[in-house]
Image (cartoon, grey):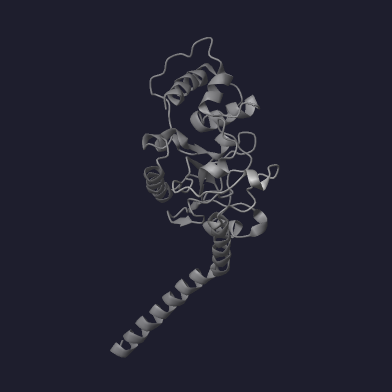
């Protein structure tokens, strides 16, 4: 092959790569613009001083005023909620999260190949948790970061995916000071509605400092252990106790997710709720 032909082939290869990159970046140009405009609108709401529509309607204007404090900051997340996408590809999930009618999103999507896509600013409220509860927190969307793992719910999580997740979690934990106990799953906060992330390696995650796990050596649970109170102390919504038990077992037992606590399950529960009391 002549030098001219080699040069031409290199140029054509470069052109193909350039077109490929351009197509990828322009594919979401429209939704990126929508995101930018929405963020601009929220910025204008925050910038307003005094704030719009926050006056006390039932009080006379003479009896209320505005003085801007110099001591404030942006709210930050205190929880990380893990999900599986229940879809077949990252591309499918990105499509779902960029269609207004779906009304769902997440802060991050972690692909099977380990690639991490951020979709919502950490300081903004993504719509990933839905109707949920953890302890006394009834609006997890407002206090958490949502991470979606590209997984249909019935397959293993790849090594590349888990390695990227560990790096992402380390960054978020350090940046926002998120407590170890506050790395949980969608099923934990919505036990009657959601099973995700299904078949997830929670023990491995806890060993790296993201979430709690029970000790290898367990004491037999006391006869007077109140399982409902123990589950509530951990954070579970116990209004539907069967759903709470299933969610607990989905996270910590995994080999059996029936709504019945065995003697072993109670020993695990007893060990864990004491850890949550200390955390």
Q: What residue occupies the far front of the structure in this picture?
A: 62
Q: As displayed, is residue 83 above or below residue 51? A: above
Which of the 4 image quadrants contains residue 237? top right
Residue 154: in sight, yes or no? no
The tally of labels here is 0
Which of the 4 image quadrants contains residue 279? top left
Q: What residue occupies the far right of the structure in this picture?
A: 58
Q: As displayed, is residue 134 above or below residue 84? A: above
Q: What residue occupies the far top of the structure in this picture?
A: 223
Residue 195: in sight, yes or no? yes
Q: In this view, does 61 lie to the left or right of 200?
A: right
Depth check: 252 or 186 in front? Answer: 186
Which of the 4 image quadrants contains residue 48? bottom right
Q: As displayed, is residue 153 above or below residue 265? A: below
Q: Is residue 240 left or right of residue 183?
A: right
Q: Where is residue 277 in the image (x, y as percent from the top left)?
A: 45, 23
Q: Which residue is drawn at 47% across and 74% down?
A: 22
Q: What residue occupies the far left of the structure in this picture?
A: 3
Depth check: 256 or 108 in front? Answer: 108
Q: Position of residue 241 (x, y in %)?
A: 63, 25
Depth check: 222 or 150 in front? Answer: 222
Q: Residue at x 55, y 34 (%)?
A: 188
Q: As displayed, is residue 198 above or below residue 86? A: above
Q: Residue at x 40, y 34 (%)?
A: 206
Q: Where is residue 81 in the image (x, y as percent from the top left)?
A: 51, 42
Q: Where is residue 229 in the image (x, y as percent from the top left)?
A: 56, 20
- State the quadrant of the N terminus: bottom left
């Amino acid at each position: 092959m002549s030098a001219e032909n080699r040069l031409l082939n290199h140029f054509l290869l470069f052109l193909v790569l350039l077109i490929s990159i351009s197509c990828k970046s322009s594919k979401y140009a429209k939704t990126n613009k929508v995101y930018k405009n929405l963020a601009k609108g929220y910025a204008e709401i925050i910038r307003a001083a005094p704030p719009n529509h926050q006056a006390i309607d039932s009080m006379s204007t003479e009896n209320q005023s505005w003085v801007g404090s110099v001591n404030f900051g942006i709210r930050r997340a205190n929880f990380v909620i893990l999900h599986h996408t229940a879809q077949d590809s990252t591309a499918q999930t990105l499509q779902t999260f960029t269609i207004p009618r779906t009304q769902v999103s997440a802060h991050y999507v972690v692909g099977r190949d380990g690639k991490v896509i951020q979709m919502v600013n950490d300081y903004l409220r993504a719509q990933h948790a839905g109707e949920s509860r953890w302890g006394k927190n009834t609006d997890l969307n407002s206090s958490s970061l949502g991470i979606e793992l590209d997984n249909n719910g019935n397959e293993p999580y790849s090594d590349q995916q888990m390695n990227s997740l560990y790096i992402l979690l380390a960054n978020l934990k350090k940046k926002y000071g998120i407590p170890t106990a506050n790395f949980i799953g969608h099923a934990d906060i919505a036990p009657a509605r959601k099973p995700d992330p299904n078949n997830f390696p929670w023990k491995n995650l806890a060993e790296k400092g993201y979430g709690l796990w029970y000790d290898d050596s367990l004491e037999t649970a006391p006869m007077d252990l109140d399982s409902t109170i123990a589950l509530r102390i951990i954070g579970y919504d116990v209004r539907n106790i069967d759903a709470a038990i299933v969610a607990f077992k989905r996270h910590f037992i995994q080999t059996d997710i029936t709504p019945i606590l065995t003697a072993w399950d109670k020993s695990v529960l007893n060990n864990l709720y004491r850890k949550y009391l200390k955390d």
